Image (tube, rainbow, N blue to C red):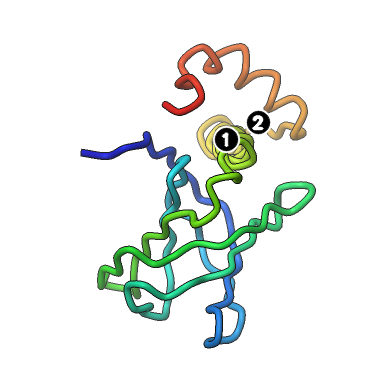
């Protein structure tokens, strides 16, 4: 059973393997208070420490995670990271909300053809869905 609720996302991330691979640009699958998962062209071994960054959030969200699973997919790998810094929980919570809003903005454009600014998307998402967002520590 999951300890934290995961929130879907399609936000770009960047990562560097500590003492290893060069920085890579990948796509976030989902994010929660406990960690995140992302798509990668590169397999990463369980236990590997990874610096990751979500540049689209202003200021960029940067922290460290540890690989807890790596699953082969048809076109690459899905990597699961746990956050290694417990003090990042509040910042991660804010990133979760921003990812929801960005995902909402993209879905509205795809399904309705309507373009919104970040602020318009945030106000609309908050009015429709913020009450469904689990309490901190979800």
**Which element type, helix, strand or loop, lies under badge 2?**
loop
What residue lies at 32% left-to-right and 73% top-to-bottom? 46
Say which of 105 and 76 sits in front: 76
Say which of 109 and 7 sits in front: 7
Question: In the rendering, which numbered label is found on residue 114?
Answer: 2
What residue lies at 49% left-to-right and 62% top-to-bottom? 65
Q: Position of residue 24 (x, y in %)?
A: 58, 77
- Which quarter of the picture shows residue 5? top left
Q: Nearer the viewer, mark 1 or mark 2?
A: 1
Does the residue at mark 1 contact the one at mark 2 (Cβ under 8 Å)?
Answer: no
Label 1, label 2: how far apart the Cα atoms are: 27 Å
Question: In the rendering, which numbered label is found on residue 35?
Answer: none
**Which element type, helix, strand or loop, lies under badge 1?**
helix
- Which quarter of the picture shows residue 94? top right
What residue lies at 60% left-to-right and 22% top-to-bottom? 125
- Is residue 59 left or right of 52 when viewed as pictured? right
- Is residue 57 left or right of 33 when viewed as pictured? right
**Relative to 118, is 78 above or below?**
below
To which residue does mark 1 refer? 93
């Amino acid at each position: 059973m999951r300890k934290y609720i995961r929130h879907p996302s399609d936000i770009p991330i960047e990562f560097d393997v500590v003492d290893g691979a060069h920085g890579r640009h990948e796509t976030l699958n989902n994010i929660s208070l406990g960690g995140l998962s992302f798509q990668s062209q590169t397999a990463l071994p369980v236990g590997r420490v990874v610096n990751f960054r979500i540049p689209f959030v202003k200021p960029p969200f940067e922290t460290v995670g540890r690989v807890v699973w790596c699953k082969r997919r048809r076109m690459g790998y899905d990597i699961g990271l746990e956050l290694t810094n417990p003090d990042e929980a509040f910042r991660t919570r804010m990133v979760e909300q921003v990812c929801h809003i960005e995902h909402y903005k993209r879905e509205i454009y795809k399904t309705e053809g309507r373009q919104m600014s970040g602020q318009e998307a945030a106000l609309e998402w908050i009015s429709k869905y913020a009450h469904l967002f689990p309490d901190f520590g979800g």
